[in-house]
Image (cartoon, rainbow, N blue to C red):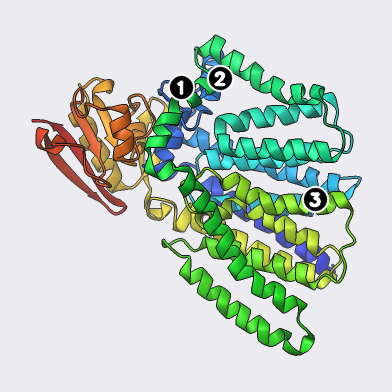
C-alpha cells in the first residue's frame, strides 16, 4: 500500500496524539508537587476554607459536593484536566470550522489543537488549575463567539463562560468580557437585551452559591481586595510589568524575522542567519529559571512574524483577520493578573500561536504544511514528556515515584520512598493534634493535602505579607507548623518551637512543634 506525504503527516499527527495521551495517563497517579499542586488540590477540597479568595472556583466544587457528595482527590483532579483539555481541543476545531465555513470538523485541526493544549503540561503541575481552566474556557468562548448567527442560547453560553472565568481568574474575565462586547458591537448586534443575557448566568450562579453555600464570589472579591493590595507580588504596576516584559521580548525577537521576510532575496539569507542568532541570544537572556519551554513560544511568535512579512497581499475576510488578531491577543489576556512572568506561562497559550501559523500557511505549498506538522509533532511530544515525566514541576522525574501513599481514605498516590518516609514521620507526630492547630507556610500547602488536613482560613500561605494579613498574632493558636524556609517567620516565632529538618531531593521542609 502506498501512502502519500499527506497521509503520512495525518498518521504522524494521530500517532503523536496517542503517544502524548499515553504519557499523560501513565503518569496520572504518580508524583505530587507540594507547592502549586497543593494549592490546586486544596481548592478542590470541599472542606477547605477560602476566605477573601483570589481564585474562587472552589465554590463550584463545594456546590457539587453539597448536591452530590462528590469530592475529588489528586488523581481525580488530573483526570478532570485531561478531559477538559480534550473538550478544549474539540472546541478549537469547531472554532476553525466556523471561521472557514467548513461543512465538517477537520480531524487534523482537532489533533493539532489537542496537542497544542496538551503542551500546557510542560510548565506547572498536571492537576486542574486556574491556568488550565481559563485556557479551556477561552477555547469554548472562541467556538461560541464565532457562530454565524448567535442565538439566545449561544449568548447565554458566552455569559456562562464569562461567569465561570470570574471565579477562575477575574482579571481575564474582565478583558474577555470587553472583547466580547467589542466583537458583538462589531457585528452591529449589541443591544441591552444581549447584555442582560450575558449577565444572567453570573447572577444565577451568585444566587445559587449564596443560597446553597452562604458564600458568593463578589463578596470574596471585595473582602480580598485589601489583602491583595498588601501583597507586593500582586501590585497592579508589577502585574502590568509582567505582561509588558513578555510583549517586549517577543517583539525584540520577532521584528528581525519580519524585516527579513520583507527584504529582497539578495539579503534574505544573511538576515535570516543574523535573526536566528539574535533570537538564540534572546532565549538565553530570558531563561530566568531552568525551564526552556519559553524558547518554543518565542520561536513560534517569530515564525508568525516571518509569515506575516512574507505575505504580498492580505486578502482575508474581515472576520478571519479579526480572529487572527484575537488569537495573537489572547495569550496576554489570559496571562494578565498572574504574578509569574509571561514567558514562563507562555507555553500554556502555545496552541493559539500554533493555530495562528495554520491561518497563515493556508495557501502555502503542501510540502511546507507537512514540514510544519512534523516539527509541531516533535515539539509537542518533547514538551509533554518533559513536563509530565522527566522534568515535572517541583519534583524529580516520575520514575522515582513507586511507593503508594494513602493520603485520604480510599485515595492514593505513588510517591518517592524519601517523601513517604517524611510523611510517615510527620503523621506520627501530629496524629493527636486538632486540624485547626496546624498550619503550613510558605509555598508548601501540599503537605496538608498528603496528611489529610486542611489549611486554616486560606488554601495556601505564600509569603510573610499574606501570613501577617490572615494571622496578625502568628504563631498564637498553632501547635505545629510545616515550614519551608522561603522567608523567615514573623517575630520570634522560631524561638517558641522545636524544629526537625527533612532534606528531600526537591528541597528542605521543616516540622516545628511547641517546646
Residue 193: which quarter of the image? top right
Residue at horizontal 71 percent and vertical 51 percent from the top: 327
Between 364 and 81, the residue placed more toward the observer is 364
- Quarter of the image with the N terminus in it: bottom right
Q: Nearer the viewer, mark 2 or mark 3?
A: 3
Q: Which mark is residue 322?
A: 3
Q: Is residue 447 visible?
A: no
Check the image and report above or below for 33 versus 40: below
Q: Earlier in the sequence, mark 2 or mark 1?
A: 1
Disc 3 is placed on an element classified as helix
Q: Residue under circle 2?
A: 64
Q: CA distance from mark 2 to mark 3?
A: 38 Å
The residue that appears at 59% across and 18% down in the rendered structure is: 206
Which residue is more in the foreground, 227 or 143? 227
Marker disc for residue 46: 1
The quarter holding residue 505 reads bottom left
Query: Which residue appears at 44% of the width and 43% of the height?
Result: 235
Image location of residue 51, percent across then percent down:
41, 24
x, y percent for residue 130:
53, 38
Q: Can you say whether 209 is above or below 198 in the image?
A: above
Reading the chain from its start, which is encountered first: label 2 or label 3?
Answer: 2
Q: Disc 2 versus disc 1: distance between alpha carbons?
A: 9 Å
Q: Secondary structure at mark 2?
A: helix
Q: Secondary structure at mark 1?
A: loop
Residue 136 position within the rendered picture, expressed as x and y whole percent measured from the top left: 64, 40
Q: Identify the image quadrant of the C terminus.
A: top left
Query: For the residues carrying marks 3 and 1, which lies nearer the camera in this image?
Result: 3
Residue 147 in view here: yes
Check disc 1: other Cα within 10 Å, few if <14, some if 14-19, many if 20+.
Answer: many
Residue 336's quadrant in the figure?
Answer: top right
Residue 264: x, y in percent?
Answer: 78, 84
Amino acid at each position: 500500500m502506498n501512502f502519500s506525504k499527506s497521509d503520512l503527516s495525518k498518521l504522524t499527527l494521530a500517532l503523536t496524539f496517542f503517544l502524548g495521551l499515553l504519557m499523560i495517563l501513565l503518569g496520572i497517579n504518580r508524583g505530587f508537587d507540594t507547592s502549586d499542586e497543593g494549592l490546586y488540590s486544596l481548592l478542590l477540597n470541599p472542606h477547605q476554607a477560602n476566605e477573601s479568595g483570589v481564585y474562587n472556583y472552589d465554590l463550584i466544587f463545594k456546590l457539587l459536593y453539597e448536591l452530590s457528595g462528590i469530592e475529588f482527590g489528586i488523581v481525580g483532579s488530573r483526570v478532570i484536566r485531561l478531559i477538559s483539555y480534550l473538550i478544549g481541543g474539540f472546541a478549537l476545531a469547531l472554532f476553525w470550522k466556523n471561521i472557514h465555513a467548513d461543512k465538517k470538523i477537520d480531524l487534523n485541526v482537532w489533533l493539532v489543537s489537542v496537542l497544542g493544549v496538551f503542551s500546557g503540561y510542560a510548565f506547572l503541575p498536571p492537576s486542574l488549575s486556574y491556568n488550565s481552566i481559563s485556557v479551556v474556557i477561552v477555547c469554548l468562548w472562541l467556538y461560541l463567539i464565532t457562530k454565524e448567527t448567535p442565538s439566545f442560547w449561544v449568548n447565554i453560553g458566552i455569559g456562562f463562560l464569562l461567569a465561570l472565568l470570574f471565579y477562575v481568574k477575574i482579571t481575564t474575565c474582565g478583558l474577555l468580557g470587553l472583547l466580547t462586547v467589542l466583537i458583538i458591537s462589531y457585528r452591529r448586534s449589541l443591544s441591552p437585551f444581549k447584555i442582560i443575557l450575558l449577565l444572567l448566568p453570573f447572577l444565577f450562579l451568585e444566587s445559587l452559591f449564596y443560597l446553597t453555600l452562604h458564600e458568593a464570589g463578589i463578596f470574596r472579591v471585595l473582602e480580598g481586595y485589601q489583602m491583595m493590595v498588601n501583597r507586593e507580588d500582586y501590585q497592579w504596576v508589577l502585574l502590568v510589568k509582567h505582561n509588558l516584559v513578555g510583549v517586549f521580548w517577543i517583539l525584540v525577537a520577532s521584528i528581525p524575522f519580519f524585516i527579513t521576510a520583507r527584504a529582497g532575496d539578495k539579503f534574505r539569507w544573511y538576515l535570516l542567519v543574523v535573526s536566528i542568532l539574535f533570537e538564540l541570544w534572546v532565549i538565553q537572556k530570558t531563561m530566568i529559571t531552568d525551564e526552556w519551554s519559553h524558547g518554543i513560544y518565542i520561536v513560534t511568535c517569530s515564525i508568525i512574524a516571518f509569515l506575516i512579512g512574507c505575505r504580498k497581499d492580505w486578502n482575508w475576510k474581515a472576520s478571519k483577520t479579526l480572529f487572527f488578531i484575537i488569537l495573537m491577543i489572547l495569550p496576554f489576556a489570559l496571562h494578565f493578573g498572574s504574578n509569574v512572568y509571561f514567558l514562563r506561562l507562555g507555553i500554556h497559550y502555545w496552541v493559539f500561536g500554533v493555530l495562528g501559523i495554520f491561518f497563515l500557511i493556508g495557501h502555502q505549498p503542501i510540502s511546507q504544511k507537512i514540514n510544519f506538522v512534523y516539527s509541531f509533532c516533535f515539539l509537542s511530544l518533547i514538551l509533554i514528556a518533559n513536563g509530565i515525566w522527566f522534568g515535572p514541576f517541583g519534583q524529580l522525574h516520575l520514575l522515582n515515584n513507586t511507593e503508594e501513599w494513602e493520603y485520604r481514605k480510599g485515595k492514593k498516590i505513588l510517591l518517592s520512598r524519601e517523601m513517604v518516609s517524611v510523611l510517615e514521620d510527620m503523621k506520627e507526630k501530629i496524629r493527636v493534634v486538632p486540624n485547626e492547630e496546624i498550619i503550613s507556610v510558605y509555598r508548601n500547602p501540599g503537605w496538608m493535602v498528603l496528611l489529610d488536613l486542611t489549611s486554616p482560613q486560606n488554601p495556601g500561605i505564600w509569603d510573610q505579607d499574606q501570613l501577617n494579613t490572615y494571622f496578625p498574632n502568628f504563631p498564637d493558636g498553632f501547635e505545629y507548623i510545616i515550614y519551608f524556609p522561603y522567608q523567615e517567620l514573623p517575630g520570634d516565632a522560631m524561638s517558641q518551637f522545636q524544629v526537625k529538618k527533612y532534606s528531600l531531593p526537591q528541597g528542605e521542609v521543616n516540622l516545628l512543634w511547641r517546646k
